[in-house]
Image (spheres, helix red, strand yellow):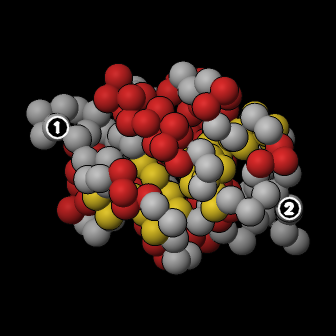
Amino acid sequence: MDKKFNFEYKVVGDVSRIKGKKILGVFTTRHATSYSKKIIKDIVINFHNNYCFIMTSETYERLGIGSEIGEFVLIYDQEEFRNHKKDVFIKTFLKNDFTELKIRYLYKDLFISTKSDNVLILEATKFSKNLNILALYAQEIGKEVYVLPGRIDSGSSEGANRLIFDGANPLYSLDLLKI
């Protein structure tokens, strides 16, 4: 028997302005740099009329985005999903080093990707296994996956650059996000 996804969420910003907008799922590594923080603020400022941004509450806090510049849907937490049908997909990637906390974050990320029109990954280290799984899953369900390229000498960009090498769309210009 499948359990349903029951996430707690809240809308930050003007709820009435969310209707009719495309949804951009935003993801980043736990170690977001000033580079990714600047880029997401530029994206929100330039595209808040076109997009509603959906992300985990942790990502929102990590990026330091203010609600005055756009509308956001924040995902907080969820019930246990051990019996959900997506487990089959996820278990093919999980190794023994995945903790329960990482699995909870992965479920939130996968949920966000299913609700998004496009997916944007700002930064990913070579250890960002959840973001690798997320990118593959989003591509499998037909989402456009954009990744912010980073410096080749930066550890916070190694995983992101690898995702681009493996087929994700490089976000080399903000114009790529135009509707």
Q: Please tell me whether mark 1 sits on a helix, a strand or a loop.
A: loop
Q: Is residue 70 above or below residue 17?
A: above
Which residue corresponds to the image point at 51% horizontal and 37% vertical from the top-left? Answer: 45
Give the label on residue 27, or none: none
Q: Residue at x 39, y 43 (%)?
A: 122
Please say if 130 is above or below 170.
above
Answer with left or right where residue 10 lies relative to residue 100.
Answer: right
Between residues 99 and 111, which one lies in front from this camera angle?
111
Q: Secondary structure at mark 2?
A: loop
10 Å crowding of disc 2: few (<14), some (14-19), many (20+) = few
Residue 133 in view here: no
- The answer for how far apart the CA atoms under marks 1 and 2 are is 40 Å
Circle 1 or circle 2, nearest the eye: 1
Q: Nearer the viewer, residue 132 or 112?
A: 112
Instruction: Look at label 1 and name its amino acid.
Output: Arg
Residue sitting at x 56%, y 70%: 89
Query: Which residue is under mark 1?
Result: 151
Which is more toward the observer, 84 or 37? 37
Sequence-wise first label, 1 or 2: 2
- Residue 162 can be seen in this image: yes
Q: Amino acid at mark 2?
A: Lys
* Location of residue 95 in the rendering, given as x and y in whole percent from the top left corner: 45, 52
Relative image position of residue 129 (x, y in whole percent) = 41, 48
Residue 71 sits in quarter: top right
Q: Which residue in the protein does label 2 denote?
A: 4
How many marks can you see?
2
Judge left or right: residue 169 versus residue 24: left
Location of the N terminus by quadrant is bottom right
